[in-house]
Image (tube, grey):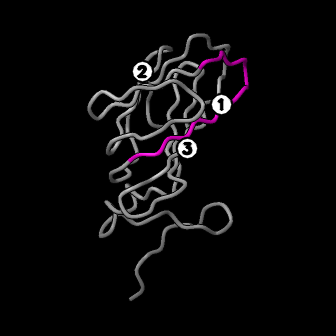
Amino acid sequence: ALSPRAPAGPRGLRPAVRGEGEDQALTDLKVPVRFEHQGVTVDFGVVQEKEEVYTAKLTVTAGEKVTGLALSLPVGGEVDSVTGAGWQQDGDTLVLEPDRDLEVGESLVLTFTAHGRAQAPRTCRSTRGECAVV
């Protein structure tokens, strides 16, 4: 007997089946991670990873005017450099302070290079309030 199949969704795609390999899919760093709260969206993705050094890109987009933005997020390893913002690392937390405000719809791209293993953050905080994974 044939087993029932899930109905096809948009473009004939079927929903993913949960089970073996699920944990790997949740931590796949090739897929951007998005955080959003109170008009601030942060997309995170690893753009380069070689041995124990990786470079990550954050795209911060304002859904409303944002002044004095500071973001903090968990980071894997020791950060070596950041472009696009002032920064400091406190243990496993990277604090980023861009030197400019964002207008509605404006984006800011930040990159950082770290020694260690890349880990997609699941949480972040901003001066606009808590960030949540969406």
Quick check: 132 above or below 57?
above
Looking at the rendered structure, the kind of residue marked 1 is: Leu
Side of 97 relative to 66 (left or right)? left
Percent of width and height locating residue 4: 44, 75
Residue visible at 38% across and 51% down in the picture: 118
Side of 1 relative to 58 (left or right)? left
Mark earlier in primary sequence (2, 3): 3
Looking at the rendered structure, the kind of residue marked 3 is: Lys
Percent of width and height locating residue 109: 63, 36
Percent of width and height locating residue 117: 33, 53
Q: CA distance from mark 3 to mark 1?
A: 10 Å
Residue found at the far bottom of this picture? 1
As drawn, the label of residue 108 is 1
The magenta stretch is 99-114
Side of 91 relative to 129 (left or right)? left
The one nearer the camera, 29 or 48, is 48
Residue found at the far left of this picture? 91
Mark earlier in primary sequence (3, 1): 3
Q: Which residue is mark 2?
A: 130
Q: Is residue 68 magenta?
A: no
Residue visible at 66% across and 15% down in the picture: 101
Q: Which residue is mark 3?
A: 57
The one nearer the camera, 19 or 83, is 83
Residue 89 sits in which quadrant?
top left
Residue visible at 55% across and 33% down in the picture: 42
Side of 108 relative to 80 (left or right)? right
Residue visible at 50% across and 41% down in the picture: 112
Looking at the rendered structure, the kind of residue marked 2 is: Glu
- Badge 3 element: strand
Residue found at the far top of this picture? 67
